[in-house]
Amino acid sequence: MQPLARLPISGKPAGVAVSRDGARAYVTSPEGKFLSVIDAKARKVERRIAIEGGPLGVAVAPDGRHVYVADLYGRRLVEIDPEKGEMRSVGVGAMASGVAVAPDGKTILVADRDDNAVSVIAAATFQRVATIPVGRHPFGVAIDAAGARAYTADVESDTVSIIDIAGRKRLAALKTGSRPYTVALAGGRIFVANQHAESVSVFDAATLSPIGTVKVGEYPEGVAASPDGRRVYVANWFSNELWAIDAASLAILGKAETGDGPRAFGAFIRPSQ
């Protein structure tokens, strides 16, 4: 693997989300207090959208019409129309971190880190309709392709929580490595990046049984699956690398150097065009 381009984005960029069609990417800068809108094909920053507080987690609606940003400090989720620049917000829990949107676009989940819970937002009304208790300090959150289950990486309890979205309850908690931060789903498996263990824990999504552990670089944070589910990519924050893992064999397929401190918190893989 080789870097194709590097774009200058200030403000300690952290969260990344790519639209389903691969046309645009969105990057949050918590220290800069803005969201960068990127033309992913041309590989250039189109503009910035100011967001007060601490914009961190980010996700894109399936139709691309709205972008959702978690405000880490403001206890809110911000909905942005990237074309019109219009935005509105809804209150969520303390230290809102990861964001995920269901495949049908009807439900948004926010990991409320300091409340040890997940907020459930109805996209149509943009109102919080439920909260679901999970493990201690949930950070990353992911939703499966059926929109039935969600998964949170619970940093302080060293678990990944399995959530029944319709039933609005936690079904199980699986033991991970030390300080899990993010979750990705690929090939019927759950992949959890463990920062302090410098590893990825892998589970069977159907049986919830552990499959194995993959050693990766230093302080992994971002983890995301390729659209075909054949590969999982891990951004290693301290070793400045992106690793590719075969989702079936768990073999390391390649590594690429990045800039200093890659976080890639979110669904950061662009579909091939």
Image: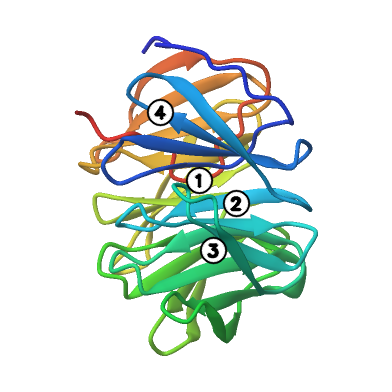
Report the number of discs: 4
> In terms of secondary structure, where does tag 1 sit?
loop
**What residue is disc 2 on?**
57
Q: CA distance from mark 3 to mark 1?
A: 12 Å
Q: Is residue 87 left or right of residue 214?
A: right
Between disc 2 and disc 4, whose residue precedes?
A: 4
* Residue at left offset 47%, top offset 87%: 168
State if disc 4 and disc 1 touch (CB < 8 Å).
Answer: no
Q: Position of residue 140 (x, y in %)?
A: 57, 55
Mark 3: amino acid? Thr
* Residue at left offset 60%, top offset 66%: 88
Q: State whether residue 201 is above or below residue 77.
A: above
Viewer-nearest of labels 1 and 4?
4
Question: Quarter of the image holding residue 167?
Answer: bottom left
Q: CA distance from mark 2 to mark 4?
A: 19 Å
Question: What is the quadrant of the C terminus in the image?
Answer: top left
Q: CA distance from mark 1 to mark 4?
A: 17 Å
* Residue at left offset 22%, top offset 29%: 272
* Residue at left offset 52%, top offset 13%: 6
- The circle drawn on residue 39 is 4
> In terms of secondary structure, where does tag 2 sit?
strand
**What residue is disc 1 on?**
266
